[in-house]
Amino acid sequence: MEADPLYHVKQLFYQSSYKACISEASSQSVTPSDDDPLPLERALYISRSHLALSPPSTSDAISILTPFTSLDPAPLPARAGVAFAEYLAAPSSEGVDAVRDLLLEAEGEQGESTVRVIAGTVFILEKENEEAVATLTEGTAKEDLECMALLVQLLLSLDRRDLAHATYATAKKIGNDSMLVQAMEAWIGLKAGARPLHQAYYFFEELYQLPSGRTGPVLASHAAAHLLLSHVDEAKADILEAEQGSYAQDENVLAVGAALGMEGYAAKLASSAPKHPLAVDLEEKSSLFDDAASKFAIAT
């Protein structure tokens, strides 16, 4: 089997080492070429890495794709990448519609899978879950590991571990050794508990030990696995390491810190990422408590 020329770029992206991914992809050509698709693919991973940072660097994400969107015709994945960046910079219904239009245009075309994973991400952020599921299960998404990985995350967030496991089983047949498939298994393990939880911990421990592995998302996942295994002190140590390593504003780090009851983390999460599921849940519970408390008065 021929080696994937983007193997190292993809590995860094999948393990959430976004700055290292940008550096690796930028070390080779990202100039448009008529006979070589790799520059565009590298540019897309650079752009998506900029958008995955916390906070996202939308201007840099657009800038790296501008040489490609200036072409006539402009490649659909590049246009989708720019549309995604523009949406993150200023979320709007017009931005969502632009992504929908690109998704329709991409059906059966080169780069359809990339457009689908970007569109699926936007729909998830918009809580258009049915549309996201359709996007990630139709067309080329049926055989694309990135689409499947995003679908597994969505299904787990909807408490459909059965469907998530079925998707993982399909993905395993396509790329058993892929880091994305291993990640899917680990995400499911965090939900399942018992032996799968231990397997999930080992996966995140492997990422944690990599030279560029101690990123915000990895430290948050490592901490979450520790927390679910009742290793509270180790989980707190991960969160403190993330804070010291310039990931103090990463919403996943803040969420796990809040779940651990660490001082100030819930307030930071509510302030910097008010739409995060945990922030929303805490706000709803606080409102319910205040409402209940208002119905009682202290006897004098």
Image (cartoon, rainbow, N blue to C red):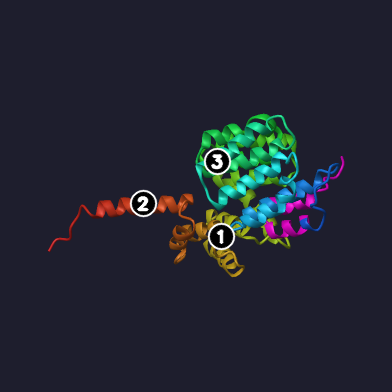
Q: Say if residue 252 shows up in the picture.
A: yes
**Residue found 49% across the figure and 52% down from its top:** 276
Which contiguous range is marked in magenta?
1-25
**Residue found 68% across the figure and 41% down from its top:** 146
Does dot 3 land on a helix, a strand or a loop? helix
The label nearer to you, 1 versus 2, is: 1
Whether residue 103 is situated above or below residue 289 in the rendered picture? above
What kind of secondary structure does the magenta stretch mostly adopt? helix
Residue 5 falls within the magenta-colored stretch: yes
List the residue tagged with mark 3: 96
Label 1 crowding class (10 Å Cα cut-off): few <14, some 14-19, many 20+?
many
Q: Which amino acid does label 1 sit on?
A: Asp
Direction left: furthest residue: 300
Q: Which mark is residue 127?
A: none
Which of the 4 image quarters holds residue 78?
top right
Q: Which amino acid does label 2 sit on?
A: Lys
| Residue 103 horizontal/vertical position (percent) | 63, 35
Q: Which amino acid does label 3 sit on?
A: Val
